[in-house]
Amino acid sequence: NETINKIAAGEVIESPKSIVKELVENSIDAGADEITVEIKNGGKSLIRITDNGKGIEKDEVEDAFKRHCTSKISTSDDLNSLYTLGFRGEALASIASVSHVELITRTGGDSYGTKITLKGGEIISKEDIGCPVGTIITVTDLFFNVPARKKFLKSDASESGNINEIVVSLALSKENISFKYINNGNVIFRTPKTNNFLNTISSLYEKDMYNSLLKVDYENNGITITGYTTNLNYYRGNRKQQIVFVNSRLIKHKRINYFIEAAYNTLLPKSKYPACFLKIKIDPSLVDVNVHPAKTEVRFQNEDNILNEVKRSVYSALNSNNI
Ligand code: ADP
Ligand code: MG
């Protein structure tokens, strides 16, 4: 199948964090507006994602775990104008192949749901079950059958730190979705469903950062950049609070960080890092999101033009001084 061949094959599942990301993106694609992420021991012993999305049809539950089975693309052209987050049909198959999975799901059209369990990709059981509309997927015993990879998992604290970071990013990318994050039984945060980026930021960070935010609201040459960036008095020792989305997709792009910081440097040379939350909207045909299967890396056409617009958007926020 040509569609499949156009998709670069690769490792989707390298860590608990990548599992959380893939599963939450599935919930987002399913139209959920309430998503709960629960982990234990850095995701090694348990990752559970609960959503109120549209669920999976009874006769499609098994197929969802087959490699390259996706309900999200029909032609290879769709790959060029991608709006849903998942598109390789690889995540569930990959995750199930290295763990124990239980999936409970129901669609609005059915009066009862389906529960399926798998171990190492093999279906162990499948039965009808009463449950709310939506999907609950539970991943346990990660890498039980790949000891080499299990050995390379980091400490619980380190893996849960990575998961925390990705859940924060996902929550920021969707201010119309309420995210609840539970780590070892403790609710770490819960974002509101207010469709207001500032409310979401304030539910995730301390007050001193919130109080130093300046509004970014910029448009030029078909690029729209909105969000918030901190004033010249707020700095961190790292870039963890610089979060950038392109067409709602979290991206990592070192040069964008440099250009954000360059805007600050023109006003005040400094050694540390501002916080910055930007949402860039751009014609999807100018972005190649398929550079790496983990999908946080992107390549832009006319990269320098776009980066200069980012710098200008931050620079004008720093000069406007209002929230
Ligand atoms: P992809 O997201 O690339 O299509 P996945 O392996 O992540 O591939 O998921 C396979 C399919 O399972 C999806 O296309 C979707 O139809 C279904 N699916 C997975 N998770 C959910 C969910 N939380 N809610 C509804 N459908 C889901
Ligand atoms: Mg997916």
Image (cartoon, rainbow, N blue to C red):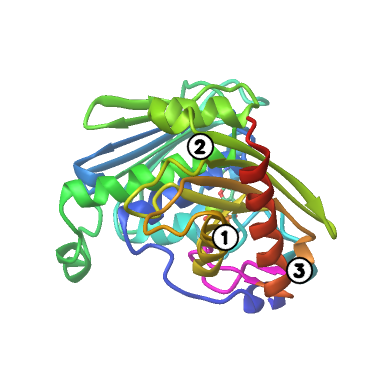
Who's the residue at 38% across and 46% down the image? 165
Give the labeled residue for mark 2.
171
Q: Residues within 10 Å of mark 1 (few under 14, many from 20)?
A: few
User: Is tag 2's residue or tag 3's residue first in the polypeptide sequence?
Assistant: 2
Which residue was labeled with disc 3?
Answer: 286
* Pointer 1 residue: 266
Q: Nearer the viewer, mark 3 or mark 1?
A: 1
Closer to us: 102 or 189 = 189
Residue 290: say if magenta. Answer: yes
Question: What amino acid is labelled 1 in the image?
Answer: Thr
**Disc 2 vs disc 3: Cβ atoms closer than 8 Å?**
no
Q: Amino acid at mark 2?
A: Ala
Cα distance in 3D space between marks 2 and 3? 25 Å
In the rendered image, residue 311, in percent from the top left (x then y), is placed at: 64, 59
| Residue 77 in sight here | yes
Q: Nearer the viewer, mark 2 or mark 1?
A: 1
- In which quadrant of the rendered image does the N terminus lie? bottom right
Disc 3 marks a residue whose amino acid type is: Leu
Residue at the (34%, 64%) spot, across then down: 14
Q: Position of residue 83 (x, y in %)?
A: 71, 53
Region in magenta: 287-299
- Label 2 element class: helix
- Which image quarter: residue 246? bottom right
Q: CA distance from mark 3 to mark 1?
A: 28 Å
Under circle 3, the secondary element is helix
Q: Which comes before the other along the chain, label 3 or label 1?
A: 1
Please, which residue is most extreme toward the front here? 268
**Dot 2 alpha-carbon crowd within 10 angstroms: few under 14, some 14 to 19, many 20 or more:** many
Quadrant in the picture for the C terminus = top right
- 182 lies above or below 309: above
